[in-house]
Amino acid sequence: MKNILSSYNITYNNSKVHHCDLIDLPKVYSNNGSLTAINNNTEAPFSIKRVYYLYDIPSGASRGGHAHKHLYQLVVAASGSFDVILDDGNFKRTITLNQPFIGLLIVPGIWRELANFSSGAICLVLASDVYMEEDYFRDYTEFQAQKI
Ligand code: TYD
């Protein structure tokens, strides 16, 4: 995955929805429950600098509504399910996440909305950098204008 990413030479203005990929995460099963581990530069194809999670999401709410300039993210439905609507300015792709051992890699320059959260859903996000408001496109017209 790391090689694929560098060979695409992805930047926020040339990235496409098909650069976003589902990643199978290892599942260690036992009779007492399952465990999934995500390591830097292996299961996650970048160095993880931040982890955050969304929870207590009211029925009918949506999240996201922005794109990032440089940030890579791996999004996991740690519990429950939700849809991720990806948009590269030309094409949209909707992915349903509903398994804690599947991650969705979102590359820079992809507008995303998260919607249709099930009750009790937890959206776990592993990110390649710390929170920086300067890294966001929050205006869709501005986002679309800079896409090649
Ligand atoms: P935002 O990224 O817009 O959340 P979402 O995409 O889930 O709707 O962030 C919502 C608020 O939380 C915003 O005020 C910034 C703040 N925030 C942090 O303080 N740290 C973080 O790591 C993130 C992702 C957001």
Image (cartoon, helix red, strand yellow):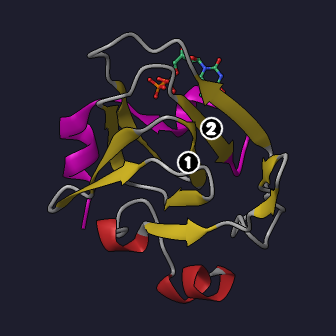
**Callout 1 amino acid:** Val
Which part of the image, by quadrant, shows the N terminus?
A: bottom right
Q: Residue at point 57% right, 58% down?
A: 103
**Label 2: element kind:** strand
* Span highlighted in magenta in the image: 127-148
Say which quarter of the image contains residue 50: top right
Q: CA distance from mark 1 to mark 2?
A: 6 Å
Give left or right: position of 78 versus 113: right
Q: Nearer the viewer, residue 43 or 142?
A: 43
Give left or right: position of 127 versus 66: right
Name the residue tied to disc 1: 75
Q: Does the magenta run of residues contain 32?
A: no
Q: Tell me residue 51's x, y (percent).
A: 74, 37
Name the residue tied to disc 2: 124
Q: Tell me residue 62's x, y (percent).
A: 32, 23
> Would you say the residues marked 1 and 2 are in contact, meaning their CB atoms lie under 8 Å apart?
yes
**Callout 2 amino acid:** Leu
Can residue 32 be spotted in the picture? yes
- Label 1: how many Cα within 10 Å (few below 14, some 14–19, many 20+): many
Q: Residue at point 55% right, 89% down?
A: 7
Q: Residue at point 32% right, 69% down?
A: 16
